Image: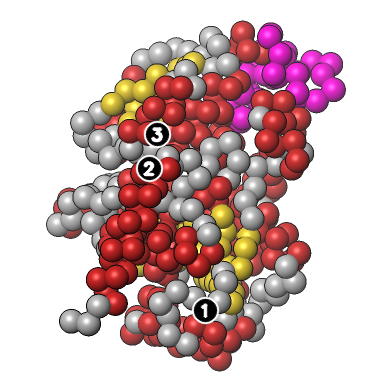
Amino acid sequence: MEDVGAAASRLVRFAPLLTKLFPALQASSGLIESGLVPLKGAYPALAESASHGRYWVKTDSGLPVAGSIKARGGIYEVLAFAETLAERHGLLAGAADYGVLAGAAARACFGRYEISVGSTGNLGLSIGIMASAMGFRVTVHMSAEARQWKKDKLRAHGVTVVEHEGDYARAVAAGRARSLADPQGYFVDDEHSMDLFLGYSVAGLRLRDQLAEAGVTVDAAHPLFVYLPCGVGGAPAGITAGVKLVFGEAAHCVFVEPAASACFMTRLQNPEREGISIYDAGMDNRTEADGLAVPVASELAYAQTRHLISGVVTVQDAVLFADLARVQASDGLKVEPSAAAGFSGPRALVGTVEGQAYLREHGLLAAMPQANHIIWCTGGAFVPAPEYEAFLERGRDYLAAWQRPS
């Protein structure tokens, strides 16, 4: 709890700087947070959904500054590194607040350092936007799955984008090797970073406050289920740690992965095989959920949460697109394919033999009408209109095909 509390305090210290760099944050006094909104009507495509409790969406798909869940960890790690440099170089001496780090002296200092990261897209956006705004030099190593618009947006912020033909793991390895060779380099390591993990974990404290404000009780008689899209595992693991820290055994966290890229499930199924790849398990990593197209799970995320999570669900791409279109029609929410993964969580929990077995084994069946389910939508706000319309069209086509009589 101490580490998570310290991370939350660091974000408060940086709020004056964030309001200077990003005017959109002035209304929230520098707080980067998303809304917790109830789903309208019954849960999509789940029979008798009302008997299983109430459904909410955590709209990280619209988080300020970076437009995705990666704003939590990525921005936090940039700020943590900047604070270390600021203290080392005396940039905060006599300052009223951290807003001084928007000044020329701080930018000149930060400009001597290069921050780099390997990414399928959204983490690169969060690091690139934040670090470049503070004056750092930034390089993002993008894997083959990365969307072109994400590369274009980074370049528009003055970020150097290195495109790799290989997958996420190869892009990370290349970025790490290059950064280690630079004495002024700092590598944000999505596979091993505790700062990223802590940045994500603060979400548990924020969620506690939002649920309290909404009048939601979380205890044994009112269980909380949280469904988190999972790529390398850092974001869902950090959030799970924060949620479990706050709510303990009353909270149940479920990761959701593309069926072709289920790296965390593969690691859980092979506890003795550190670094096992989905390719070893016969998967091909071919998914439209670019943010989740990861072949090897983070060992840090695995170690921190393997005993905390309740399970892993896999989902086909067609279902991602269908849910993307469904939630836009019902609730007006704009999400990208990877961000729609969480909608498959409740279906698996209450609509499968395995899910029912979990509820029975944990004595949860009687409490389900009083349960609260949070589907964590992780990105989508920055998707260009033409690409998003194509997503919607695909989703509508899948829905129409499934509704036609066979």
Q: Report which residue position mark 1 lands on.
A: 42
Identify the residue at image location x=50%, y=67%.
330
User: What amino acid type is highlighted by mark number 2?
Assistant: Pro
User: What amino acid type is highlighted by mark number 1?
Assistant: Ala
Q: Quadrant of residue 110?
A: top right
Point out residue 232 in the picture as x, y percentages from the top left corner: 37, 47
Q: Quadrant of residue 318?
A: bottom left
Of mark 3 and mark 2, the one earlier in the sequence is 3
* Colour style of the rendered protein structure: secondary structure
Point out residue 29 in the picture as x, y percentages from the top left corner: 76, 39
Q: Is residue 123 above or below residue 109?
A: below
Foreground disc of the pair 2, 1: 2
- For the residues labelled 3 and 2, the Cα–Cα distance comes to 14 Å
Label 2: element kind: helix
Of mark 2 and mark 1, the one earlier in the sequence is 1
Assign the C terminus to one quadrant of the image: bottom left
Region rendered in magenta: 79-105
- For the residues labelled 2 and 1, the Cα–Cα distance comes to 30 Å
Identify the residue at image location x=40%, y=19%.
160
Disc assigned to residue 150: 3
Q: Is residue 206 left or right of residue 110?
A: right
Q: Report which residue position mark 2 lands on.
A: 386
Using the rendered image of the protein, determine whether residue 350 is visible from the camera's viewpoint: yes
Magenta run includes residue 90: yes
Q: Do the residues under discs 3 and 1 have CB atoms within 8 angstroms?
A: no
Residue most toward the bottom? Answer: 366
Label 3: element kind: helix
Q: Residues within 10 Å of mark 2 (few under 14, many from 20)?
A: few
Magenta stretch: helix, strand or loop mostly = helix
Label 1: element kind: loop
